[in-house]
Each structure stands twice: as structure tokens, then as C-alpha cells.
Amino acid sequence: MLFSVVSNGDLLAPTQPDAVVPWWSFTKTVLSAAALSLVRDGLIELDEVLPESSFTLRQLLRHQAGLADYGELAEYHAAVARGDTAWTTEEMLNRLEASRLRYPPGTQWRYSNVGYLYVAQLLERLTGLSLEEALKQRVLAPLAVPHVSLARPGEQLGGICRGVMPGYDPGWVYHGLLLGTLSDAALLLEGLLSGQLLPRSLLQEMQTALVLGGPMPGRPWTAPGYGLGLMIGAVSDGLTLCGHTGSGPGSTVAVYRCAHAGNSASCAVFSEGDDQGAVEAAVLSHLLDVLVIRPGS
């Protein structure tokens, strides 16, 4: 596994080489941060009903908007496995019957990539910029990770980054797929959660988690939850991790921050394959080492 760690804002030596990798669903954390910057600037309110349906931005960011997810479609998985070109957004939404909400917004929780597609569209609509330029201006440049890029639909990623199935079309990630190093991922999360981008009130909103259940077999979570673009929860060592895990055809990435006894550390881990539990356990191990925490200490 490759990894990189930031301790109290300082980048420790990353695993070499510090390769460019797909950030998969850690992209959602960046999208959420950008959307909250719109709230910060008075361009939208968190609980404002959006034109797409009867849900709000908060409900989109927390996966409580009532939306289905294209990962539920067997034909989606078959097309990805064949190496097909991604469907257009309109075709995907039609196949999914995405306009039909599966539950009243705010009453349940259901992970949905479609919700973050709407977040990406909102960013473009309110900024008048392309998604990549909006993310650069609102998150990547302010947090000093300007070399992170957005994969382009139809682009062959094999010569650009590690950990992507040959022939995979990044257009299948409808909310956008960021590519970057693990160091940049850890630095971004540390900067974001230490208050370098958003005011304290919005950062608290972002980290207010809906608890989703109890211990998860094969994964370190004892009380998993979800905030606004953040997976948040207690883990087996009594700590709370905050960040995001993501998988796609070929690899898994997990990026988390932990604060303890006045210190903080952020860690990003990448592995080929789809074992999310193993990657999350590696993140936790590195954070425990850096923060000098062990059971009973």
C-alpha cells in the first residue's frame, strides 16, 4: 500500500514514489467543500430547496435527498466491466428513473452518487465556471493543492495515474473524478478540517454526522456516520475519524483525519483492489503511530 501522512499541518515523508492516483469518492469531500464555500459567500443556503426536486443542498450532501444510485443498475456494472464508453448523463438518469424519489427527503439515508452529480451541476450553475475551474478556485488553490486535476470523460487514465482498470472511462463517475497524489489528499483534508477554508459554523455543519449503525464486520468502524461529504465515526481505538473512503475498478483510497490531545494528523492510503476495510485499517494504524496512541494509553 502507498500512503502519505500530515502531522499538525506538516507533510511527513510519503511512500515513494508519491504517485498520482484516482481519488474516487474522496472527490465528494472536495465537492462538498466547494458547495459550502457557496454558502459561505451567500450564493445559496444549506436548507434552500433546489430546482431539481424537493430536496435541499444539505440533504444532497448528506445522502438524504431521496435519490437512487446508478450503482443499483446491473447494466451499469456490465457496461463498466466491458470497458464501454460511459452513457450520457441524460441516459443514465433516464435508465435510473432518477426523477422518482425513493423516499421523502430528510426521512432516510441512502448513498447516492446522483446526489453529488447534482452538487457538481449546482457548482457550475452558480459560479458560471466549468466544474474543474470551480473546484480549483474554491478549494484546490486556497488549500494549496493546485496540481490536482479532474479526469475527462473518455480519457485513457493508464498513462496518467495508477490503479484504474484498463479501458475504464472516467465518465462513469458522473459527479467527476479527481486525480492527485496521496500527499495532496492528506494536505487538503488537513487544511479543510483545520479551518483554512470555511468558517467555524460551516465546518461544524460539515462535521455533524448522522449515525448510521453499529460495528461493521471487517472494517474499523464501531459507530459509522455521515456528515456533509464526510464519512465520520468512532473506530475500535475509541477515536473519531473524519474523511472519506472510495473505490473504483482497480483500486481503493481512504483519506482520514484524527485529532487527539491537541494534535492532529491526516493520512491517505491507496491500494490496488477493493478491500476497503484493509485500507481503512492501514489509515488508522498510521494515525495511531503518528499521534502516539495505542490501546490503554
Image (cartoon, rainbow, N blue to C red):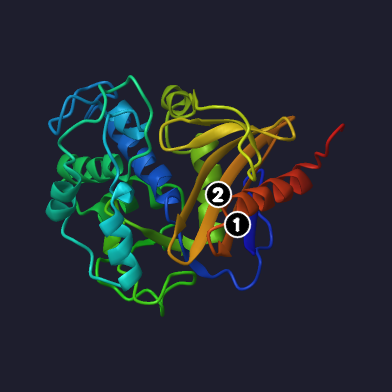
Numbered circle sitting on residue 269: 1
Q: Residue at x 60, y 28 (%)?
A: 214
- Of residues 206 and 202, the one nearer the viewer is 206
Q: Callout 2: few (<14), some (14-19), or many (20+) C-alpha neighbours within 10 Å? A: many
Label at residue 51: none
Image x and y of residue 8, in percent? 66, 43
What residue do we see at 47% from left, 52% from top? 246
Residue denoted by label 2:
255
How many numbered marks does the figure carry? 2
Residue at the image point whose x is 29% and y is 24% from the top: 46
Task: Work out whether mark 1 precedes mark 2 in sequence or the reverse, and give the earlier one.
Answer: 2
Q: Amino acid at mark 2?
A: Val
Q: Which structural element holds mark 2? A: strand
Extreme residue toward the front, this view: 74
Q: Tell me residue 84's x, y (percent).
A: 25, 71
Q: Are marks 1 and 2 in contact (CB under 8 Å)?
A: yes
Q: Amino acid at mark 1?
A: Val
Return the residue nearer the eye: 278 or 186: 278
State left or right for residue 245 relative to residue 25: right
SS type, badge 1 = strand
What's the distance in space between the residues labelled 1 and 2, CA to CA?
7 Å
Report the quarter where the N terminus lies: bottom right
Give left or right: position of 238 versus 101. Answer: right
Disc 1 crowd rating (10 Å Cα; few below 14, some 14-19, many 20+) is: many
| Residue at the far bottom in the pictured view | 159
Residue 280 image point, x, y percent: 62, 48
User: In the rendered image of this protein, does residue 187 appear above or below residue 63?
Assistant: below
Which corner quadrant of the image does residue 194 belong to?
A: top right
Q: Does residue 148 show up?
A: no
